[in-house]
Amino acid sequence: MLFRSEEIWDNFAYFIRQAARVAEEEGVMIGIHPDDPPILHLGGTTRIFSTFENYKRALAIADSPNVGICLCVGCWLEGGELWGVDAVTAIRYFGENQKLFKVHFRNVTAPMPHFVETFIDDGYQDMYQVMKTMQEVGFRGVAIPDHVPKMADDPRLGTAFTIGYMKALLKRAEEEVGRR
């Protein structure tokens, strides 16, 4: 069964308007995660969170201070030019509009179709630029490691490396931007 784009948008609008009202009443923030992988069709179904313009459309439909985005840097990098803007531009736009609630910090080797999830210091995105932009827009949400590659026989090693690297990027970005 193929679901057309407008059917998906209608269903999203119905859901998010109800969910946003409850989120506002309860003080809950809803962050919309991008399609992963960020492609327009998968399994016969249209997907709507795979372009910058569609994210803007979704937020306009929600029309709520409690509905924003969970920007997965890795998904954004996977999609590359398909998004319409790069990850740093998206972070700047959504951050300046107080719609950036959460960031999944992940890097990949190249855009689709041939990408590999990698350590944050080893992909094609300069993750310092991501962290610096987050500081420039006053981001105060949650930034978490995402899809951390395995290091040795202990999965905690890769996570520890990633968190340490993120902390170093944050410290340097705060110093450069003048925030703390």
Image: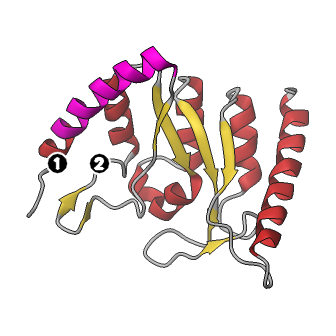
- Marks 1/2: CA distance? 7 Å
Q: Which residue is mark 1?
A: 5
Residue drawn at point x = 56 percent, y = 23 percent: 98
Residue type at numbered disc 2: Ile
Quadrant, the N terminus: bottom left
Q: Is residue 102 above or below residue 26?
A: below
- Relative depth, front residue between 27 and 44: 27
Q: Disc 2 on helix, strand or loop?
A: loop
Say above or below: 90 vs 164: above
The reply to whether the magenta stretch includes residue 17 is yes
Q: Are marks 1 and 2 in contact (CB under 8 Å)?
A: yes
Say whether residue 65 is left or right of residue 103: left
Relative to 159, is 21 on the left or the right? left
Q: From this viewpoint, is residue 65 visible? A: no
Outermost residue, front direction? 26
What secondary structure prevails in the magenta region? helix
Residue marked by disc 2:
48
